[in-house]
Image (spheres, grey):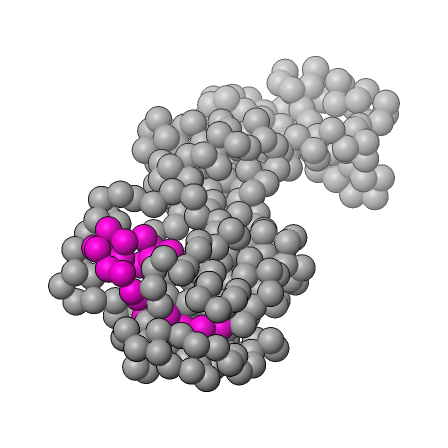
């Protein structure tokens, strides 16, 4: 039976390049008969009763309906992709990858399943389980981000190494990890598929958590598109920049400028703004209508 690529680039690389991989001399049951000298990397039929679940499995809940559908498929077609186990002792194995197939096989009434035998220590078991979990198609963005974070913190991987393991570039990994900085309410919405990854990535560019929650609630209540959320973020960012410019000490007018503004405002009958950095500047004379503009022009004697 040839090894398929369903596990994904990262997990396959981890399984095939394990430094612990070595030949195991043991008696195993293959199709009901005894076979010796089975080595790591082979595919054999193993009794379900001899396999224990992976204690490092990050996935806690399995969709019962989807599991039953897989069981029905296994009854008809068998297990196309073998599970992966590590040998603990003669006739005792621990699951590394493929728990859905393992559980569905039990539901389907199987007594044996095809399995790859691999060597792995506890650290590798955790890493393999996390990577397989990431490569599921129905994971939401927060689940992926949490798995990335566990790989970094518990498996001591750098972001570049993590990217190589899961077949993603560093920027993609960073974008997922940034989601974990969002307020809990927003993370829960992403987890529950009430907010898309695109929406969340736009919101994360807002620094203030209160503003993040404001945009989030507006997005959900008004069913805003990602583009509209990006526009809101830009508007808030521009407002923040303008407020910072006004509040900046170097933008505060001197007493002389304040006095000049007062005299000019009295002269033109409207609020005149004078800005200066000590060398250059500008004078703004607002007008409310064409008639008001003509009045200002008359004062300036511009015809």
Work out which quarter of the rendered image holds the N terminus and state it. Answer: bottom left
Is residue 101 found inside the magenta-colored segment of the image?
yes
Percent from the top left, x then y, of residue 16?
Answer: 50, 78
Which residue is at a point 34% across and 59% down the rendered structure image?
A: 48
Percent from the top left, x then y, of residue 162?
Answer: 58, 64
Q: Is residue 297 left or right of residue 167?
A: right
In this rendering, the count of numbered labels is 0
Percent from the top left, x then y, of residue 287?
Answer: 54, 24
Say which of 142 and 169 sits in front: 142
Which residue is at a point 31% across and 59% down the rendered structure image?
A: 101
Which residue is at a point 50% across and 22% down the rendered structure image?
A: 288
Task: Please report the bounds of the magenta region as a residue range.
Answer: 99-118
Percent from the top left, x then y, of residue 200?
Answer: 46, 42
Which residue is at a point 44% across and 66% down the rendered structure image?
A: 91
The answer to whether 211 is drawn above or below residue 65 in the figure is above
Can residue 49 be seen by looking at this rendering?
A: yes
The answer to whether 232 is drawn above or below residue 159 in the figure is above
Work out which quarter of the rendered image holds the C terminus and state it. Answer: top right
The answer to whether 97 is drawn above or below residue 204 in the figure is below
Can residue 195 be seen by looking at this rendering?
A: no
Name which quarter of the figure residue 273 lies in. top right
Residue furthest to the left: 76
Is residue 75 found inside the magenta-colored segment of the image?
no
Say which of 163 and 125 sits in front: 125
């Amino acid at each position: 039976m040839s090894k398929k690529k369903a596990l994904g680039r990262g997990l396959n690389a981890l399984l095939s390049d394990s430094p612990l991989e070595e030949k195991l001399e043991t008696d195993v049951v293959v199709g009901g008969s005894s076979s010796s000298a089975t080595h790591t990397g082979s595919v054999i039929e193993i009794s379900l009763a001899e396999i224990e679940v992976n204690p490092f499995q990050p996935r806690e809940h399995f969709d019962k309906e989807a599991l039953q559908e897989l069981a029905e498929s296994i009854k008809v077609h068998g297990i196309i992709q073998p599970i992966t186990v590590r040998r603990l002792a003669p006739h005792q194995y621990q699951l590394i990858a493929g728990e859905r197939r393992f559980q569905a096989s039990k539901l389907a009434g199987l007594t044996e399943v095809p399995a790859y035998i691999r060597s792995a220590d506890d650290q590798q078991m955790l890493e393999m389980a996390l990577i397989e979990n990431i490569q599921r198609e129905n994971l939401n963005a927060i689940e992926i981000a949490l798995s990335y974070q566990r790989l970094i913190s518990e498996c001591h991987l750098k972001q570049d190494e993590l990217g190589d393991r899961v077949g993603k570039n560093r920027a993609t990994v960073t974008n997922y990890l940034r989601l974990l900085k969002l307020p809990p309410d927003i993370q829960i919405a992403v987890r529950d598929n009430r907010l898309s990854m695109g929406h969340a990535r736009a919101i994360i560019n807002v620094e203030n958590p209160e503003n993040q929650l404001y945009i989030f609630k507006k997005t959900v209540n008004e069913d805003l598109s990602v583009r509209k959320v990006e526009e809101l973020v830009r508007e808030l960012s521009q407002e923040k920049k303008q407020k910072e410019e006004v509040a900046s000490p170097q933008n505060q007018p001197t007493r002389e400028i304040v006095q000049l503004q007062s005299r000019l405002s009295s002269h033109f009958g409207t609020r005149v703004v004078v800005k200066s950095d000590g060398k250059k500047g500008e004078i703004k004379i607002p007008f409310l209508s064409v008639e008001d503009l003509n009045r200002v022009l008359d004062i300036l004697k511009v015809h």
